[in-house]
Image: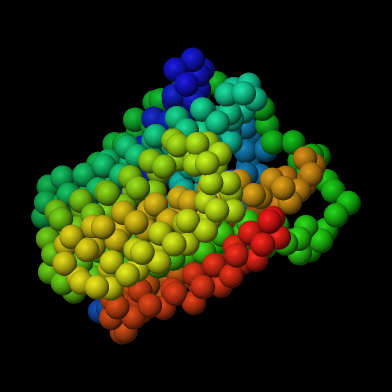
Amino acid sequence: MLQLPKNVWILSLSLALFMSPSVFMVFVGGIIGDSLTPVKGLSTLPVALTVVGTVSTIIPVVRLMSMFGRSKIFLSVCAYTVVLTMVGIASLTIGSFVLFCLVSFGFGVTFATMYQFRFAAIESVEGDQRASAAAVVLLGGLASAYLGTEAATLGKDWFSVEFAGSFLLLALLLAVAFVLLLFFKPEKKFNAEEDRSKRSLFEIMKQKVFIVAASSAITGYVVMSFIMTATPVSMHVMDGISLEQTKHVIQSHVVAMFLPSLFTAFIVKYLGISRMILAGVIILFSAIIVAYIDRSLGNYWIALILLGLGWNFLFIGGTSLLPRTYNENEKFKVQSINDFLVFGFQAFAALSAGWFVFNYSWELTLLSVIPLLVVQLLFILWWLRRDA
């Protein structure tokens, strides 16, 4: 891992900086939304719009990279995001919920670009180093858990307008990323010719292995996003738990999402992919039980850690199954439709979380995801019987 090329380390550090606005929005997007909108059920709309913006721009971002290369797009999006944070400050200054929502949607371009870092890292190494390169890039996700939340709390009261200083700190983080990415060497362009295939998407998607792979990632993201988005609102706005304590819970959750990725190879070797996904479903059930029992700080904390672990097992397990569904010349279109489905359903979950928690309580928010987990459990049990 230590012998990886400079590109991988640059991408790891840059991912930590790029992902900070994502963690920031999860942490305080609903809180800021609550302060700007008179309709409390819409408080988490800005958080949902970041996901909508992401799923809407993934394909255009990849197309631009195929035309101009990853390096130029990484740098352009850095500059774009710095400008966007300034618009974010303006939205807070004039108290415009609509403008803040537009800024939130605009962050989707940043996050869509961020998801391409793992591919850029893999392209920078030989085949036997790909797992190590991916693990190192994921370390950036761990750092972002602290950078995003610390930016929110440190800059919150810098100016008379609450959280304006936080957006300024985000701009500084992206400016640092811009400098780092100047040292990133241009990589191979995406080859659109490789995407040609005789099989239709429908033929590929109706495969049983695709159904299990895609549903695993979708279930992990929907359950995680739905509960995670509602958590800061439930903790801070509804239960009166301090912003500092809420921050630590969200930080722990994000760490739990990414830390297991460093040990994925060992987990898959010990459990197998199907049992890894099954373990993820069980962990998510455990998270719901812990959160439902009591609304204390300790229960929120344990539940959100379990939520992160369960997401990791389901998402990594589903991602590991996905290559079994396509041939080499089909990979880009299959990966694209998979990501579109995952982030599309995640957007719906994030959009409905605020409305649900305000109108139906934290407890019903938790119970509402159980049917989805039951369906996923049935898929996995069916898959295990097939493999037996």
Please report the residue visible at 65 percent of the width from the left and 66 percent of the height from the top.
Answer: 382
The spot of residue 314 in percent (x, y) is 51, 55
Instruction: Give the number of marks.
Output: 0
- On screen, residue 266 versus residue 283, left or right, reads right
**Which corner quadrant of the image does residue 71 belong to?**
top right
Relative vertical location of residue 352 with respect to residue 201 in this rendering, above or below: below
Q: Position of residue 58 (x, y in %)?
A: 58, 51
Q: How is the image coloured?
A: rainbow
Q: In the picture provided, is 212 more to the left or to the right than 184?
A: right
What percent of the width, then of the height, locates residue 190?
69, 36
Can residue 34 be seen in the rendering of this structure? no
User: Is residue 288 positioned above or below 125 on the image?
Assistant: below
Is 83 left or right of 153, judged from the image as shown? right
Q: Residue furthest bottom?
A: 359
Q: Nearer the viewer, residue 208 or 93?
A: 208
Given residues 335 and 67, the one toward you in this image is 335
Q: Residue at x 64, y 49 (%)?
A: 321
Residue 386 in which image quadrant = bottom right
Residue at image x 81%, y 61%? 203
Q: Position of residue 372 (x, y in %)?
A: 51, 72
| 82 and 194: which is toward the camera | 194
Q: Residue at x 29, y 78 (%)?
A: 363
Q: Is residue 270 above or below residue 46?
A: above
